[in-house]
Image: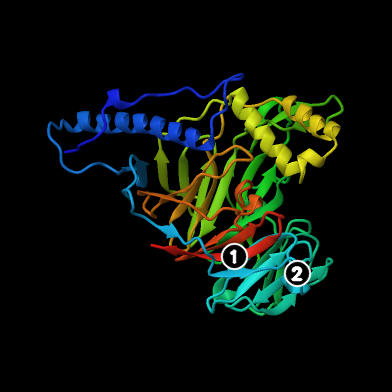
Amino acid sequence: MIVFARRYSDLQLRHPATHGTPMPTQSEMHQEMRTRESLATILVVAAVLVAAGCGSASLPVHTIHTDSAGIPIATAVEPLWGPGEGWIVEPEPLLEIGTVTGAPEYQFTDVVAAVRLRNGDIVVAERAASELRGYDAAGNFLWRAGRSGEGPAEFRSLDFVGITDGDSLVTYDGALLRAQLFDPRGGLARSYRVAINEGEGANRAAVADKAVGVVDGLLVVRFIEYGDEVPNGVVRWPGERLGAVDLADGAGRSLIVLPGNEADVRAQEDGGYSHGSYVFSKGPEYGAAAGHLAVIDTEAWSVRLISPRDGAVTAVFRRDVAAWEATNALFELHLDGIVEIAFADPDQTAPERVDGLRRMWRGMPRAPHLPVLRAIHVDGTGHLWLQPYYVAGTEPPPFEILAPDGTWLGSVTLPPGLHRAFIQYQAPYMEIGDDYVLGVWTDELDVQYVRMYRINK
């Protein structure tokens, strides 16, 4: 038996602002999204009521767990946490590493990842310096490893660091298409060229692109796959293939093939093509940790867990969330954020440069609706952290948390200032442990700091 406390007549839907009317605030956007989700919730629960033939009530439904051909499916209805319940990330960091001036080993320019070892040490991958830096649990500098180059323990593009068995460090170099393994003090152990065996069904045009994460001794890598023909129009192309590289012997295998990000593609008579941006494009994003490999498509609120060994789908988690219309007002709000990102001080930038950027973006084709999701992360306990979509220049909404079985728990807000690259462009660079969040935060001067915050559960 099921009760629901809200009535259909209590819901009053508003329409997103259109061009010429006041632009909605971020809080208004999320409030309307919640209202739409509430309507979807009522419809889902009503269907359950009808199917069950219930005439009286007991406990409310939070997540509906079903099964399809042996694959668990969880449909989120309402968050389990009530008001005042749930996890809280403390506002003050447990640890901060970084400085504006001082010793160079404490200055950061382009941190792409920070990871925590079992003894509490922190290892930071600083791309600008092409090096790994080790710090103790109190943030004191211990060692550095690596430099610019193409030889052993060198990097042309240090794009990722993760942890595998025995606290060994795994790096990925997107320019050299190379993975290297280091011991916990920065000593090089071995290196592999990242590739998928031809016998695993990978198209020969597939090129390693970025590391997704480390799961069960496997480095999961996204490959870009162009295929033999160039399509025309706004299409999901090129495709994306996830592959897994065994860190014990360097053997690679294909896992799953997915449509890539939407783009405006035009084939040329000479056999070439143009590949233009499509504003508010949808595409796949990935998260990996704690034995889980999660795949989302930002077009819908849906998560697939897949096996890092063979790519088989092991679970599906979903929720009925309507996509927002990409109105002119929302586009202009997004464009304001793009300008702020592109120019440190737009008011002090030559007006023709700002106007040129705005004209370029206004000339791009754009999707009729916003993406529903932006990113997904997996924490150290297998919980999923989903980032709802938000337009550039606005504060990110809270993460939505799913338990390992897909139960919708509620939302968690992170301290402000989380570096844009960690959220706006999905990457496995934010480490969420059992009871901490480790990432890069920036101050008002855009100075980077590696910080760790406690999660109170």
Farthest-out residue, left: 56
The three-letter code of the residue at mark 1 reads: Arg
In the structure shown, which secondary structural element does the residue marked by tag 2 occupy? strand
Q: Earlier in the sequence, mark 2 or mark 1?
A: 2
Q: Is residue 281 above or below residue 284?
A: above
Task: Report the amino acid beneath label 2.
Answer: Glu
The reply to whether residue 226 is visible in this rendering is no
Report the residue at 61% width, 20% height from top.
19
Residue 137: x, y in percent? 57, 77
330 w.r.t. 422: above or below? above
Picture quarter with the C terminus:
bottom left
Q: Bin the neighbour count of mark 1 within 10 Å (Cα to Cα): few under 14, some 14-19, many 20 and up.
A: many
Q: Judging from the image, what secondary structure is the residue with disc 1 in?
A: strand
Nearer to the camera, 206 or 18: 18
Which residue is rendered at x = 78% and y = 56% of the image?
175
* Residue 196: image tag: none
The front one of 191 and 364 is 364
Q: Quadrant of residue 343?
A: top right
**Residue 419, visible in the rendered structure:** yes
- Disc nearest the viewer among 2 and 1: 1
- Indicate the position of residue 159 as horizontal and vertical percent values: 71, 59
Q: Quadrant of residue 176?
A: bottom right
**Along the line of sight, which residue is nearer the eye, 44 or 421?**
421
The residue under the point 72% across, 33% down is 277
- Which residue carries the number 2 mark? 131
* Mark linked to residue 451: 1
On-image quarter of the N terminus: top left
Tell me: residue 288, above or below residue 372: below
The percent position of residue 373, horizontal first and vertical second, equals: 52, 40
